[in-house]
Image (cartoon, grey):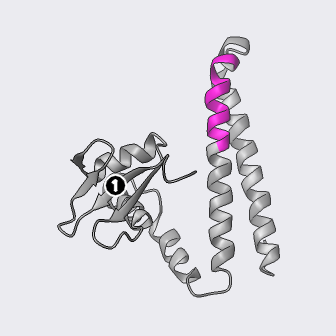
């Protein structure tokens, strides 16, 4: 993806975000909506042109985790912190990325199959359970592979 296809958001020292495509100031909530809508964007420091995209995404996650129903338990967060600075840090990142992508793929598969399945089988719940079991098994196998590659028992 080239930068021509990306929406450019500039972050100013006063913490305001400026969408260069719409020529308007936007909020963190607007950036979150860009993520949800899968619209490519980059966040640049208005002064230095440093890429701040990752930092802003982490800020969105922090806000989501702080309010409502958190995605990560305290134990998961603590364990993630423990991986920093260790040789296995890279493995954890790859593991999370693969499993989240698998989850997204399965969710997309479920979304596209739901109308067909409902029409043909008339039993959405049964199909959902099958897909979730497939996803669990896939995640279990990937976990075993990661643990084996790190020399850990699974």
Q: Which residue is mark 1?
A: 9
**Residue at position x 23%, y 65% in the image:** 12
Q: Is residue 30 above or below residue 67?
A: above
**Residue at position x 30%, y 59% in the image:** 10
**Residue at position x 71%, y 50% in the image:** 136
Percent position of residue 104, x then y: 61, 45
Percent position of residue 34, x then y: 40, 44
Image-based side of 28 in relation to 122, left or right: left
Q: Is residue 62 above or below residue 136?
A: below
Q: Quadrant of the C terminus?
A: bottom right
Q: Is residue 88 visible?
A: yes
**Residue at position x 74%, y 64% in the image:** 143
SS at badge 1: strand
Please state which of residues 62 and 47 is positioned toward the viewer in this rendering. 47
Q: Is residue 153 visible?
A: no
Please state which of residues 132 and 34 is positioned toward the viewer in this rendering. 34
Residue 113 magenta: yes
Boundaries of the magenta span: 105-116
């Amino acid at each position: 993806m080239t930068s021509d296809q990306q929406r450019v958001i500039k972050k100013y020292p006063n913490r305001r975000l400026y969408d260069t495509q719409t020529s308007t100031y936007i909020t963190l909530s607007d950036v979150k909506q860009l993520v949800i809508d899968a619209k490519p964007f980059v966040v640049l420091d208005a002064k230095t042109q440093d890429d701040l995209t990752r930092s802003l995404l982490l800020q969105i996650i922090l806000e989501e985790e702080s309010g409502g129903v958190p995605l990560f338990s305290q134990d998961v967060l603590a364990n993630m912190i423990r991986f920093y600075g260790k040789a296995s840090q890279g493995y954890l990142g790859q593991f999370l990325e693969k499993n989240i992508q698998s989850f997204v793929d399965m969710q997309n598969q479920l979304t596209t199959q739901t109308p067909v399945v409902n029409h043909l089988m008339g039993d959405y719940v049964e199909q959902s359970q099958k897909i979730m079991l497939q996803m669990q098994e896939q995640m279990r196998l990937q976990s075993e592979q990661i643990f084996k590659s790190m020399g850990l028992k699974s």
